Image: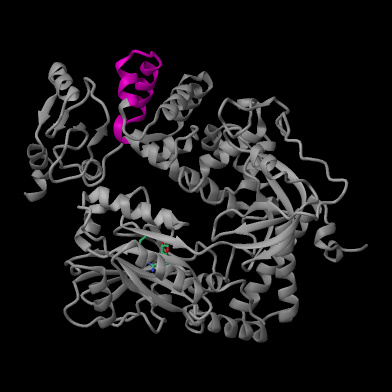
């Protein structure tokens, strides 16, 4: 009988593809084990590479079948769980992106407004390459390297100290005079020439061949055996810092000099840019020299040079306000649309996706690309069979940009967007002014239910390790997991899980253990996990900060259903919760099914009350404050950011629940209303004194 292995990937049926991916995962894992742990490969390099390429080709054709244990996700032999976890003393942030000169101009304007700078005061920026590698944090105590960690999710990474110690440009001992505690952050990467050489060597030795320098760097750093890492050409650039016990100087430019003096390499070429034009010129220049720079860059990072400003600017959500990544244009390629599939998301939104003839764009195989929505397809008249231009930018989902004129097959009809949900057949409707068509099936639509479950367990929500998308789909099919609450009843089905294909005692126990760990959960995560339309991580946190506990939030949402209630006004007054978000929240809490779900969950797990970080001892923590009039020393944005950092809630309008109105000169109606409501009115100085109080103690 002919084996599946002889069938070309493009001829596989979905079931066969799933079977083949499973077989490949097992075989490749076995070859990895023999090669890395027993030093006894059973196949030639060419055979091994062919297996990996076949795995990748099938995954490109059937991305939804890619397995959690796929070899393509496991770069290098080390499993992701092989390292101890490390909590970062200061979170490792990510950067917001700018794609155009206008975005950069906006970035500088925002800084000006936030800091309240005079028009003639220059905002000097440091511009340096954005290196495409992986970020790590190095902790020095008394000048000695004591810990090196990967970024992980920004809060918690992996301890890879032994591996980082093998890098020539990471000093183990710093000269005398460095701060006692010093965390240096930067990027581990592989230069292009080293990458080519390394892949040649890997190939000759029968090792893995990596797709690009970034993957190679990640795979090489996350090796369980540091001796393997030591043989890889990893380099390190220092560009930022974490916890430090003494000030680092006045400017980033000065700090770059210090980092060099301490033995680090800083990213080059870099430039001090006193104006927008200088930054843009640097970007144009660097892009034109992209090929000359010996490592992959995906753009330029601009950072505010003055460290005192940088301190004041702080961060919003997970990105600093003082830095931005100005990306280089995305890479493009031409290919053919084979089919248009419509996916259903957790809120019922129908998203069209183009299935493409697989094509390599900037080093990555692309077989699917988003078409965004109905209008996007209609405006571009994209049809099945068309030649199209696809674009890929960094880790963004690839998209179809446009149809190539003159290449359309004669018989291709215009694409008709479905009027019914492709999964549950409920009507799919478009509300006025909305780009998206939504399935009206709500709780009866299996696609929505499954997507909600995936969201519920995802990394920023309940973060359940070992429960991949495929598992959720399978558990849903079998009725083991229909509602998020079922997750916390899965332990009753331990045997059923152990007996399933692909599961054993260990994996089942690991999963149930991971679920047990989440029986206590922080309020912001819990709210985010509910998947309320428009409530992302930032707004979940905002709600947690304002209401403090799940019980209080539910009570307030019940009261706020009444349009004229105080609770409704308080909700609408939260700075950062717009009218449409408020409407979605109210709708969620008005839906009886959701109430049942919340009651059900409340019986199974405990949601911790929100404690504002670092603010426990601030007298303004937990207080609601409204700013009005002109402030003398702070801009409105900065005042708001500082108040929130101290645990206060900032509202846009007054209600009985307001604790303080901070009124600058020019305060009008709000001041009057505060007096009527009996709200404490503070001057700016009084507020600053109150807010600064215990910090000086
Ligand atoms: S500064 C965000 N400078 O880009 C905290 N980051 O997409 C300050 N990156 O996580 C980072 N080159 O890993 C900075 N010259 C550079 C960089 C750089 C690459 C990485 C960094 C960050 C990611 C954000």
Residue 315 vs residue 59, the one in the foreground: 315
Query: What count of labels does the image hold?
Result: 0
Q: Residue at x 39, y 30 (%)?
A: 578
User: Which x, y percent locates residue 335?
Assistant: 74, 59
* Image side of residue 331 versus residue 5, left or right: left
Quadrant of res 207? bottom right
**Residue 647 appears anywhere in the view:** yes
Instruction: Find out whether residue 2 is within the magenta segment.
Output: no
User: Which x, y percent locates residue 40?
Assistant: 66, 82
Q: Is residue 368 above or below residue 25?
A: above
Report the predominant secondary structure element of the magenta stretch. helix
Quadrant of res 38? bottom right
* Image side of residue 85 versus residue 262, left or right: right
Instruction: Find out whether residue 552 is within the magenta segment.
Output: yes
Q: Residue at x 40, y 77 (%)?
A: 236
Q: Is residue 9 above or below residue 428?
A: below
* Highlighted range, magenta: 545-572
User: Which x, y percent locates residue 694?
Assistant: 9, 45
**Residue 492 appears anywhere in the view:** no
* Image side of residue 453 versus residue 111, left or right: right
User: Which x, y percent locates residue 55?
Assistant: 72, 64
Q: Residue at x 39, y 37 (%)?
A: 539
Quadrant of picture, ligand 1: bottom left
**From the image, which quarter does the N terminus lie in?**
bottom right
Quadrant of res 247? bottom left
């Amino acid at each position: 009988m002919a084996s599946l292995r002889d069938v070309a990937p493009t001829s596989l049926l979905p079931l066969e593809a799933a079977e083949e991916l499973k077989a490949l995962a097992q075989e490749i894992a076995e070859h990895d084990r023999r090669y890395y742990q027993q030093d006894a490969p059973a196949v030639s390099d060419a055979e091994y590479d062919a297996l990996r390429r076949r795995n990748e080709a099938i995954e490109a054709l059937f991305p939804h079948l890619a397995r959690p244990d796929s070899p393509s996700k496991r770069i290098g032999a080390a499993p992701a769980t092989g390292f101890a976890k490390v909590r970062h003393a200061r979170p490792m942030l990510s950067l917001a992106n700018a794609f155009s000169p206008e975005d950069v101009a906006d970035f500088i304007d925002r800084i000006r407004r936030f800091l309240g700078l005079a028009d003639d005061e220059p905002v000097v920026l440091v511009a340096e390459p954005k290196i495409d590698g992986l970020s790590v944090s190095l902790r020095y105590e008394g000048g000695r390297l004591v810990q090196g960690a990967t970024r992980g999710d920004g809060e918690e990474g992996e301890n890879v100290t032994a591996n980082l110690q093998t890098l020539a440009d990471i000093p183990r001992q710093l000269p005398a005079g460095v701060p006692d505690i010093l965390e240096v952050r930067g990027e581990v990467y592989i230069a292009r020439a080293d990458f080519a050489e390394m892949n040649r060597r890997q190939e000759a030795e029968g090792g893995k061949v990596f797709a690009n320098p970034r993957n190679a760097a990640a795979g090489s750093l996350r090796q369980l055996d540091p001796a393997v890492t030591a043989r890889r050409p990893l380099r390190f650039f220092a560009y930022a810092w974490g916890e430090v016990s003494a000030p680092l100087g006045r400017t980033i430019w000065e700090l770059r000099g210090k980092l060099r003096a301490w033995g680090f390499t800083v990213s080059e070429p870099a430039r001090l840019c006193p104006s927008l034009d200088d930054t843009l010129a640097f970007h144009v220049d660097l892009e034109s020299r992209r090929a000359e720079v010996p490592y992959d860059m995906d753009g330029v990072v601009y950072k505010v040079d003055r460290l005192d400003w940088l301190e004041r600017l702080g961060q919003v959500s997970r990105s600093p306000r003082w830095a931005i990544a100005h990306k280089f244009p995305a890479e493009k390629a031409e290919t053919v649309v084979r089919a248009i599939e419509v996916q259903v998301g957790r809120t019922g939104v129908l998203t069209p996706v183009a299935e493409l003839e697989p094509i390599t764009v900037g080093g990555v195989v692309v077989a699917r690309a988003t078409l965004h929505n109905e209008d996007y397809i209609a405006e571009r008249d994209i049809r099945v069979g068309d030649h199209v231009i696809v674009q890929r930018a960094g880790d963004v989902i690839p998209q179809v940009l446009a149809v190539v004129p003159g290449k359309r097959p004669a018989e291709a009809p215009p694409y008709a967007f479905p009027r019914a949900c492709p999964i549950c057949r409920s009507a799919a409707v478009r509300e006025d002014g909305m780009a998206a068509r939504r399935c009206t099936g709500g709780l009866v639509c299996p696609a929505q239910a499954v997507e909600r479950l995936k969201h519920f367990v995802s990394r920023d929500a309940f973060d359940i390790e070992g429960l991949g998308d495929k598992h959720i789909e399978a558990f849903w099919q079998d009725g083991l997991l229909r509602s998020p609450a079922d997750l916390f009843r899965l332990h009753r089905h331990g045997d059923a899980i152990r007996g399933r294909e692909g599961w054993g005692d260990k994996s089942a126990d690991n999963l149930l253990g991971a679920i047990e760990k989440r029986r206590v959960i922080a309020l912001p995560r819990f709210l985010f996990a509910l998947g309320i339309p428009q409530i992302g991580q930032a707004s979940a946190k905002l709600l947690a900060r304002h209401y403090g506990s799940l019980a209080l939030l539910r009570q307030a949402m019940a009261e706020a259903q009444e349009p004229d209630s105080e609770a409704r006004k308080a909700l609408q007054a939260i700075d950062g919760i717009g009218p449409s978000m408020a409407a979605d929240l109210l709708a969620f809490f008005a839906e009886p099914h959701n109430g049942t779900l919340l009651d059900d969950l409340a019986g199974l797990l405990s949601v911790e009350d929100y404690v504002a970080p670092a603010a426990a001892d601030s007298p303004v923590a937990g207080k609601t404050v409204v700013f009005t009039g002109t402030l003398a020393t702070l801009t409105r944005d900065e005042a708001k950011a500082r108040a929130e950092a101290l645990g206060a809630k900032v509202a846009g309008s007054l209600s009985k629940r307001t604790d303080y109105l901070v009124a600058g000169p020019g305060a009008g109606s709000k001041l009057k209303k505060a007096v009527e409501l009996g709200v404490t009115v503070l001057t700016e100085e009084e507020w600053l004194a109150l807010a600064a109080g215990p910090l000086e103690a």
